[in-house]
Structures are given as C-alpha cells and as structure tokens.
C-alpha cells in the first residue's frame, strides 16, 4: 500500500510556454487489458530571457473502470525512469529511448513540431513496452512516474502477479543458464547492421524526396520558359518535358513516402534498439558476475582464515 509516493512538485522553468502546432498524439496499449498510455501535447517551455529551455510531454493513463490520470514530464525524466527501472528490475531487457539531441541552437528543436511528434511516439513506445512487462508494470518507479492512483496500482499488481515468467533456458536446453552470455558478438553485429541499414534506407528515402522536389521544380521552369516569346523553337520540347515531369515527380514522391518504407524504418530502429538493450544486459550481468565472484572469493578467504584460527586455538 505504500507504492505510490507523494507526488513531487515540479516548477516550470519559464513563466511562458508556447503550445506547439500540429502535435500528434501516440496511443499505445499496455499489458493490462483496458489500460492505455498516451504521450502527446509536446509543449515548449523557454527559460528566462528566451534562451534555452526544454519541452514537456503530457502522459495520459486511461482505464475504463478507473478513469484517467495525467502528468507532464520532460525528456530527462523519461531517462531517469529508465535508469531507475534498470536497478529495480535487474535482468529485464528495457527498451532504449532516443538519445538526446545536441545542437548549437537547441531552441530550434523546441519549435520543430515534427521532431517533437516523433519523440512523443518513441517515448510512447517505450512506456508501452515497459507497461507490458509484469515486473516493470508492478514497480513503484513506474507507478510514481505515471502518478497512478492506489486502486490502479493494486489492479496492476494483481494482474502482474497472475502472470508467469518464462523459464530461463539456453539454446542447448540447460536450465538456469544466461541465454545472452554467448551471444555478445552476434548482438554487436546485428545492432550495427540494423542501424546501418536504417541509415541507408533513410538516406535513400530522403534522396527520392529531393528528386521529386527537383523534378517538380524543373517541370515548372519548363512550363514558364515555354510561355516566353523568344524561345519558340524550344516551346514544344519544353511543354513535353513539363507534362512528363508531373507523373515522374508523383511516382518518386509516392515511393519515398510509401508505408512499407516507413514501416521498415520503424522496425529497423526498433530491432536495433532491442539489440542495444540486450548488449546493455550482457554488460550489467558481466559486472554482477564479477561482483559475485569477488564476493565468493572474499567469503572463501574469510572462511579459510577462520578455519586456520580455529585449528591454532585447539593446539
């Protein structure tokens, strides 16, 4: 009954906040039936003097029987949540969240609606995966972050307790072994290849959009040139070129914005982050194993020393 702490008071950096236009909402289902977590409404908050600042996101939790809970968080607080969950839920492959963007003029990003909408979608996906894992969803760190009321905390805990964790098995069938222990090299290669493929595909899509823009511009110039009186000899080929560029540009634009390309970009990024999470766990488990080995050695030394002292006392 003490999982939900007293809500922290959060003072805004600036007395002025600008509501960003065209902020898209991203809704993700969770592991508890009926529970939905939404991340939307990115709001730019400037510091005094208009220099610097940060963006906050509205995080809305909905449940058909328990109503809604709303809280605003900035990006750094999502990162702090993930760090806390790593400590509270050891062994869980927590999804990575997007890296912090560093620009010479960071205020530019505060007013980039497309960038903030993409970040809201990525943060929503992070919360969706976290609230779908029975250990994470029942943690005090998550319930405090989302400001869940006590009835919802109890409901989530009961649901999590009813779930069964899969047994930890190695590919060779050895129970209790770490399935990641021998996979580090493969994980590094997979992460690097996935990220490289994502970057190349993104670059190709960007080039196609640029080609579509240039093709449209060329068609417009041909159309305008064909109307000049001193290019009568070029009028026919210019008009022909102008007529043809419209279809070519439309095809290029459609290919660049195809749902299949967008979906593949999302999936490549998602699997690259998953490989990164697995590598993170490999490193954490290695440190834990080293600490356990060191502790076992110290205990063995102490035990041996006590044994020698006991023998000496009996002589």
Image: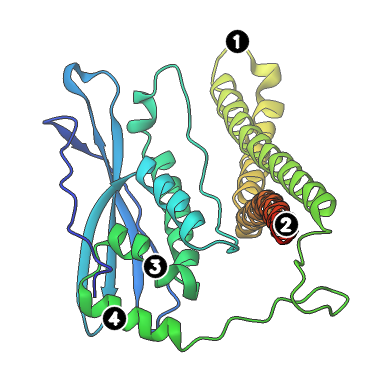
Discs 4, 3 touching: Cβ within 8 Å: no
Of callouts 2 and 3, the N-terminal one: 3
Residue beneath disc 2: 300
Nearer mark to the viewer, of 2 and 3: 2
Of callouts 1 and 3, the N-terminal one: 3
Nearer mark to the viewer, of 1 and 3: 3
Alpha carbon distance from label 1 to label 2: 98 Å
Discs 1, 2 touching: Cβ within 8 Å: no
The furthest residue to the right:
172
In the rendered image, residue 47, in percent from the top left (x then y), is placed at 21, 24
The furthest residue to the front:
315
Between residue 254 and residue 14, name the one nearer to us.
14
Circle 4: is it few (<14), some (14-19), or many (20+) Cα within 10 Å? some
Q: Residue at x 20, y 35 (%)?
A: 18
Residue beneath disc 3: 139
Alpha carbon distance from label 2 to label 3: 35 Å
Residue beneath disc 4: 154
Residue beneath disc 1: 230
Alpha carbon distance from label 2 to label 4: 43 Å
Q: Residue at x 66, y 33 (%)?
A: 211
In the rendered image, residue 116, in percent from the top left (x then y), is placed at 39, 42
Nearer mark to the viewer, of 4 and 1: 4
Is 206 on the left-hand or right-hand side of 38? right
Alpha carbon distance from label 4 to label 3: 11 Å
């Amino acid at each position: 009954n003490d999982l939900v702490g007293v809500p922290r008071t959060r003072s805004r950096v600036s007395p002025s906040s600008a509501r960003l236009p065209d902020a898209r909402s991203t809704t993700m289902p969770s592991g508890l039936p009926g529970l939905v977590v939404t991340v939307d409404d990115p709001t730019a908050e400037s510091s005094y003097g208009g220099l610097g600042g940060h963006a906050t996101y509205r995080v809305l939790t909905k449940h058909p029987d328990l109503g809604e809970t709303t809280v605003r968080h900035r990006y750094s607080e999502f990162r702090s949540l993930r760090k806390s969950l790593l400590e509270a839920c050891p062994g869980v492959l927590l999804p990575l969240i997007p890296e912090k963007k560093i620009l010479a003029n960071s205020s530019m990003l505060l007013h980039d609606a497309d960038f903030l909408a993409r970040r809201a979608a990525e943060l929503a996906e992070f919360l969706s995966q976290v609230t779908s894992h029975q250990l994470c969803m029942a943690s005090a760190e998550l319930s405090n972050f989302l400001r869940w009321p006590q009835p919802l905390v109890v409901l989530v805990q009961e649901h999590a307790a009813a779930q069964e964790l899969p047994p930890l098995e190695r590919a060779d069938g050895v129970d209790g072994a770490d399935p990641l222990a021998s996979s580090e090299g493969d994980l590094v290669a997979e992460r690097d290849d996935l990220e490289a493929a994502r970057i190349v595909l993104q670059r190709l899509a960007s080039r196609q959009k640029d080609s579509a823009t240039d093709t449209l511009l060329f068609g417009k110039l041909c159309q305008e040139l064909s109307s000049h009186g001193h290019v009568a000899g070029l009028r026919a080929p210019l008009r022909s070129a102008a007529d043809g560029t419209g279809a070519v540009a439309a095809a290029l634009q459609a290919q660049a914005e195809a749902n299949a390309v967008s979906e593949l970009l999302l999936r490549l990024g998602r699997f690259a982050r998953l490989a990164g999470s697995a590598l993170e766990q490999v490193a954490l488990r290695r440190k834990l194993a080293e600490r356990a080995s060191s502790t076992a050695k110290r205990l063995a030394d102490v035990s041996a020393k006590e044994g020698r002292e006991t023998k000496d006392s009996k002589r």
